[in-house]
Image: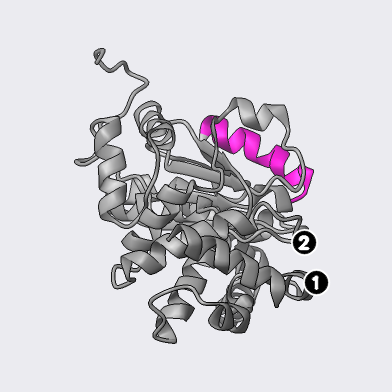
Amino acid sequence: MSTPTSDTYELHQGVGSIDEVRESLRLRGYITDRDLATSLFLSLRLGKPLLLEGEAGVGKTEVAKTMAALLQTDLIRLQCYEGLDVNHAVYEWNYAKQMLEIRLLEAEGLNRDYALKEIFGPEFLIKRPLLQAVEYTSEREGARPVLLIDEIDRADEEFEAFLLELLSDFQITVPEIGTIKAARPPVVIITSNRTRELHDALKRRCLYHWIDYPSVEKEEEIIGARLPNAPAGLARQISRFMHEIRQMDLYKTPGVAETLDWAAALMALDQDAVHADATNATLGAFLKHQEDVSRVRGKVAAGLVAAVMGGR
């Protein structure tokens, strides 16, 4: 490996190589391939944000949670939605506390102009996730949190544009206080379900990785890692069943999260194998639209179970 440059960052124990990243994630219940482990390693090594795209439920958010556990640091999460603005993402002033302080200062005989100057200080600032992430390194002697910007595609393009400066400089200006700059950039993971295309300018600032639905073998391993009490045969049959159902034209294709929910449901019913009756009774664990449930229930479910059991 080449000698680190000034643009690289020292790595935490357990992430000193791509194989270490992959194994450390596996030990924490997250099963990944070498490609994603490589992207995570480079994101840590180069200090660049990592943009994860993929269908809902394939484990994008879980990557950030697991990395925070691996790095033994805090996870700061910004959940994006339509209409998200600076007040909810960066900071806002605690107006109720400010008004109370003004009244107290005036009661002490101080004039209103002086009172107004006194109320614009850090103690009256409500710090939202982005400001928390920027300030984190300064307050903890260089420690780096994991900043998760979740489902960025749900936010407006205006907010996406706001992120460009933050991801370039990792600094935020509060007019009444000044500019706050991160001592070291946080570990940034951005997720998108690709409900809309993101701007090229945002992508240029990030490393990129697409997380696809897992193979049958990988999903079986995921079930074993997340539900260690699951019978091996049941895990194998569930993964094969889910692989088959994802080939269907459904309103919403189930992801890995739904696979785990279904496996847990069958285990709660004391099932050690996939059977038609139990499958029909638990379709709601992995199908979330009535149209999909109606299409699969009955003969289709029985046929899929027969195919799975035939392969055992």
Quadrant of the image occupied by residue 96: bottom right
Which mark identifies residue 291?
A: 1
Residue 9 picture location, percent across and down? 31, 29
Principal SS element in the magenta part? Answer: helix
Residue 165 highlighted magenta (yes or no): yes
The residue positioned 48% from the left and 73% from the top of the image is 274
Q: Position of residue 222 (x, y in %)?
A: 39, 56
Q: Is mark 2 in CB contact (under 8 Å) with mark 1? A: yes
Instruction: Residue at 75% x, 69% y: name it.
Output: 292
Callout 2 amino acid: Tyr
Q: Residue at x 65, y 71 (%)?
A: 301
Residue 32 on the magenta segment: no
> What residue is pinned by disc 2?
251
Q: Can residue 265 be seen from the camera position used here?
A: yes
Q: Quadrant of the C terminus?
A: bottom left
Give the answer, above or below, for where 95 lies relative to 171. below
Name which quarter of the figure residue 158 lies in.
top right
Q: Nearer the viewer, residue 84 or 150?
A: 150
Q: Nearer the viewer, residue 277 or 149?
A: 277
User: Between marks 2 and 1, how big is the CA–CA gap?
Assistant: 7 Å
Element type at mark 2:
loop
Span shown in magenta: 155-169
**Dot 1 alpha-carbon crowd within 10 angstroms: few under 14, some 14 to 19, many 20 or more:** few
